[in-house]
Amino acid sequence: MMEDELRELLRELVTGTGAEMAAIVREASEHSGSDAIKAVPLGMGGLLEVHYNDRPEGDGRPAAIERASRALRACARRWGADTFPEVEYQRSKALDQNRVRDRIQAYLQAFANAQGVVNAVVMVKDDIVASARELDELQSERLPFLLKQVDNEVRNRKGETSHIEILRDDLCAFAFWIDACLVAFCDGGFSPDFLRHRARMVTREIGQLLPYLDDPPSAPASVAPIPE
């Protein structure tokens, strides 16, 4: 989703420049214009605000913010957007990772209570983030092959979309966010349309939590520049 890509760009800006928060807003905040807040118009009704605890000059931050603003505009153009959505990433309000995983698990447990769903798990690349219930041996063995199929589907789409779904009687997969996949183990008694609807609701919520599981770099210098 466009919001996911925008939030990832904001996350890179925050972790790369030591900011407390970066946000796309429609109206400038009350203290915009102060030394600790850098604001850059994005066009299409959007304004990039970057909040610091100190002055954002003299250390490469202005250049990084300008690169980020260009990347945000390029993202909006790729998605064909007419306006920018309001999106933010905050370091100071980042949740404890254990709490984030617990919240993701709660969403998965609710999803797994749907008719026909036996268990549910969220993967990022090859790592299990959380599952509704402990995976049994057969479920664990099936995950690697399923993820390869999802990757193949993404490649076959030639970059058109990373939101791929695979629906079978006993196993379903929904790719979302960045290299993330929601996997549902089923008993065959589900409605495909209903499962898609529930999956979209769950992935939308989990997609907002996954960025908080990323460890920030030890220093801004360890972050590569945002591509222009």
Image (tube, rainbow, N blue to C red):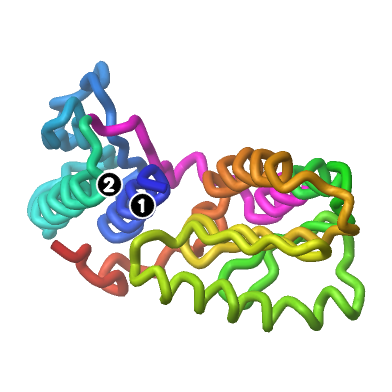
Name the residue rendered at 25%, 72% in the picture.
224
Which label's residue is closer to the chain start, 1 or 2?
A: 1
Residue 69 position (above or below residue 24): below
In front of the other: 224 or 32: 224
In front of the other: 155 or 94: 155
Say which mark, if any, is on residue 79.
Answer: 2
Residue type (three-letter) at the residue carrying disc 2 = Trp
Q: Is residue 164 left or right of residue 170?
A: left
Residue type (three-letter) at the residue carrying disc 1 = Glu
Do the residues bearing badges 1 and 2 touch, measured as CB atoms within 8 Å?
yes
Q: For residue 103: magenta?
A: yes
Q: Is residue 205 left or right of residue 84?
A: right
Residue 192 placement (x, y as % from top left) = 72, 48
**Res 204 → quadrant:** top right
3D distance between C-alphas at marks 1 and 2: 10 Å
Say which mark, if any, is on residue 5.
Answer: 1
Residue 189 position (above or below residue 147): above
Chain part drawn in magenta: 83-105
